[in-house]
Image (cartoon, grey):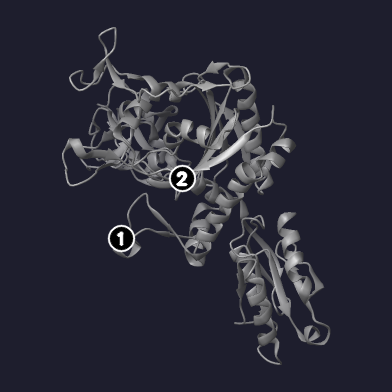
């Protein structure tokens, strides 16, 4: 399976399109087509159902440390600028970038790899974007730089393994990924990832605001509102699904790294003494969910962050990672992060955040004379009405990307096998083996032929089932071709109306993955499909 095959299918069948494609596209932005929007909606609905609506049943099965409540929120994309100052995003939410003075291209500092190579008495450090094809790119760049042909490839003397550009202290001997001369890369500098905008008629700094880079902060600033309005006691989880925006320097790998994306986040508030147990619970619960939704355990790993990797707010973080096809052999890409955030967020929004780099003329000064972002001044502590214990809750954050999850399910589902065509000849079949809960179309209704009243009866079945599921009616072409079209769209069941249907009111139901067929009564179709979807 190649990523190119998946990308091609996504466009051809209407899962995903490049945004603004007729104008050449806009890098880092993607549009979901007719099948894609249904798939992504089903991913979000499955997450919301399992994590929020049905959390009591699911938590019992997953062994939660204690009963807990779950609620939902839908917060605004643009919030008060002080939110991002106190959260740390204003100062710390950045990547380091390098520019090439020759090609005018920009790269993320930590996404360029390179190797030392020697030829014709000269030694240089050749770079390429980090990928499983980076060595091939480096070889081509080295041959061109030394003016060598492919038959002279053995004249290149490579030293050491591929290393990240961040390990280099000087760029004088570095050949940029697209440069012809050495030393064209600039020194790395900070690049804030938040999109800036302006609120109201004023375009100056007094009207400056930011598109949210994450949905989490809306939950933190509404913690007390949710607590007071629902009268829940801790532990309490607050969930949100919504758009976020990050001005990525180099968006890449299809929808894996985009500038506009959708998150599915939970902020789980609990007693500090219980936070480690809840951290372990959510790690295991979220990993199990991906297995339940059809991702093979061999393609998923749980990776605990090293102390050097931890974000400024994190006590501990574990990433659920998936073996995306664009990753090198044996490597994985982040699918979801589960973080133990401690009390950083609530405390920051109560008290403000120290920041030595900020301009003290525009900020409040702390008792030590250092500048301090001014907090809300609101009391976001929690008082237990039974024990009278007052504390700042700790937070566990399972943060999933709806787009990355959708991409992972697409990659996992893509399968190629051999099936006989209408004449019995074996042909290659592309089938999207999506979990029935996630499949964009639940069933295709097919008349065997376009005569003898079969289309009319098929349309009656279609209209009846459409009240309950997203179903599709198809009468064009041989039935075998229609089966394969449905398989390619990920439709788990095909219901065929044939001559026998007219006699005994039964239809054939075909299962996508096994192609096995059985007969059921017309009036049983809805319940049979519902049971099969729920049972996976």
Q: Nearer the viewer, residue 36 or 256?
A: 36
* Residue at the far right in the pictured view: 504
Image coords of residue 168 (percent x, y): 34, 23
Q: Secondary structure at mark 2?
A: loop
Label 1: how many Cα within 10 Å (few below 14, some 14–19, many 20+):
few
Q: Nearer the viewer, residue 5 or 145?
A: 5
27, above or below 381, in the image? below
Q: Nearer the viewer, residue 136 or 98?
A: 98
* In this rendering, the label closer to the viewer, 1 or 2: 2
Upstream in sequence: badge 1 or badge 2: 1
50, above or below 450, in the image? above
Q: Which mark is residue 24?
A: 1
Q: Nearer the viewer, residue 231 or 316?
A: 231
Q: Which mark is residue 206?
A: none
- Taking the spot 23% from the left edge, 31% from the top edge, the residue there is 186
Q: CA distance from mark 1 to mark 2?
A: 33 Å
- Taking the spot 76% from the left edge, 65% from the top edge, the residue there is 527
Image coords of residue 453 (percent x, y): 70, 90
Q: Which residue is mark 2?
A: 74
């Amino acid at each position: 399976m190649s990523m190119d095959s998946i990308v091609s299918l996504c466009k051809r069948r209407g899962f995903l399109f490049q945004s603004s494609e007729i104008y050449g596209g806009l890098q880092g932005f993607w549009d979901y087509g007719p099948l894609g929007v249904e798939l992504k909606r089903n991913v979000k609905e499955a997450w919301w159902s399992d994590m929020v609506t049905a959390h009591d049943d699911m938590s019992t099965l997953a062994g939660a440390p204690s009963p807990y409540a779950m609620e939902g929120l839908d917060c605004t994309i643009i919030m008060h600028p002080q939110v991002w100052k106190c959260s740390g995003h204003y100062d710390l939410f950045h990547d380091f970038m390098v520019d090439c003075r020759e090609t005018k291209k920009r790269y993320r500092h930590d996404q360029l790899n390179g190797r030392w190579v020697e030829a014709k008495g000269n030694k240089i450090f050749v770079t390429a974007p980090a990928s499983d094809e980076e060595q091939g790119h480096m070889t081509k760049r080295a041959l061109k730089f030394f003016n060598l042909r492919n038959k002279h490839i053995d004249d290149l003397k490579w030293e050491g393994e591929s290393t990240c550009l961040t390990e280099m202290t000087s760029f004088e001997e570095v050949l940029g990924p697209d440069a012809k001369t050495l030393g064209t890369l600039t020194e790395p500098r900070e690049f804030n990832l938040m999109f800036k905008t302006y609120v109201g008629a004023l375009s100056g700094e007094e009207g400056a605001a930011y598109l949210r880079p994450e949905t989490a902060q809306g939950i933190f600033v509404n913690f007390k509102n949710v607590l007071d309005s629902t009268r829940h006691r801790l532990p309490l989880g607050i969930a949100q699904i919504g758009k976020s925006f990050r001005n990525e320097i180099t968006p890449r790998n299809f929808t894996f790294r985009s500038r506009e994306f959708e998150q599915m986040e939970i902020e789980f508030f609990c007693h500090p003494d219980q936070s480690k147990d809840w951290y372990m619970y959510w790690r295991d619960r979220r990993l199990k969910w991906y297995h339940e939704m059809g991702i093979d355990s061999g393609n998923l790993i749980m990776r605990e962050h090293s102390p050097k990797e931890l974000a400024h707010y994190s006590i501990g973080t574990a990433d659920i990672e998936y073996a995306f096809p664009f990753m090198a052999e044996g490597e994985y890409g982040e699918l979801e992060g589960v973080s133990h955030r401690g009390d950083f967020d609530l405390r920051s929004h109560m008290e403000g955040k120290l920041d030595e780099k900020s301009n003290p003329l525009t900020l409040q000064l702390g008792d030590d004379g250092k500048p301090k972002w001014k907090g809300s001044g609101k009391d976001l502590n929690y008082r237990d009405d039974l024990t009278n214990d007052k504390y700042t809750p700790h937070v566990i954050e399972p943060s999933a990307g709806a787009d990355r999850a959708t991409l992972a399910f697409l990659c996992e589902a893509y399968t190629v096998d051999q099936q006989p065509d209408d004449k019995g000849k074996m042909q290659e079949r592309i089938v999207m083996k999506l979990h029935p809960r996630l499949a964009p179309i639940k069933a295709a209704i097919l008349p065997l032929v376009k005569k003898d009243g079969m289309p009319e009866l098929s349309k009656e079945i279609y209209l009846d089932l459409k009240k309950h599921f997203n179903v599709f009616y198809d009468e064009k072409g041989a039935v075998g071709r229609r089966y394969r079209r449905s398989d390619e769209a990920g439709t788990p069941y095909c219901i065929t109306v044939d001559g026998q249907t007219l006699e005994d009111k039964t239809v054939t139901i075909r299962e996508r993955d096994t192609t096995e067929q059985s007969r059921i009564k017309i009036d049983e179709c809805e319940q049979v499909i519902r049971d099969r979807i729920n049972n996976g």
